[in-house]
Image: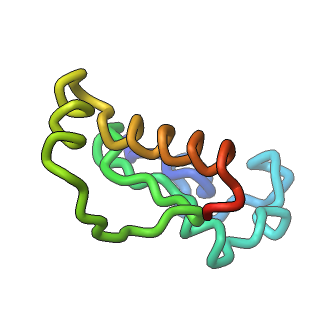
Amino acid sequence: MSANKAGSAPDSGRTMSPDEIGWDPDDAPELDDRWFAEAELRMNGTLVRRERLTRETEQVPLPADVVAKFRARGAGWQGRIEAALKEWMAEHPERV
């Protein structure tokens, strides 16, 4: 018995109609640049990379003691630095 692929009739090799598969491929959403930019890359079900349009990668030199304080609390230290910066910006909009 041959393997059944999505979109083809079992064991016949012919393409199934939208009525047979239950949906029309033409109704699928457009895969535009935004869709690809926000897509998750998974390999064997494991998340490898998640893209976000709202982030940029920059190198910002920080004092070693500041980084050490954030790293001392473990994983997620970069996120805590981001949260601290956002909090400071909200409290001091005139200095941004």
Please indicate whether residue 24 sits to the left or right of residue 11 in the image: right
Please indicate whether residue 63 sits to the left or right of residue 9 in the image: left
| Residue 88, quarter of picture | top right
Please indicate whether residue 34 sits to the left or right of residue 84 in the image: right
| Residue 59, quarter of picture | bottom left
Q: Is residue 15 above or below residue 19?
A: below
Please state which of residues 33 and 86 is positioned toward the viewer in this rendering. 86
How far across and down, in percent of the image, does residue 11 sit?
A: 50, 50
The quadrant of the picture occupied by the N terminus is top left
How far across and down, in percent of the image, does residue 10 sit?
A: 56, 46
Please state which of residues 68 and 44 is positioned toward the viewer in this rendering. 68
Please state which of residues 84 and 2 is positioned toward the viewer in this rendering. 84
Q: Is residue 29 above or below residue 66?
A: below
Which residue lies at the image location 59% right of the left edge and 62% below the top edge? 54
Which residue lies at the image location 24% right of the left edge and 21% below the top edge? 73
Please indicate whether residue 11 sits to the left or right of residue 79 in the image: right
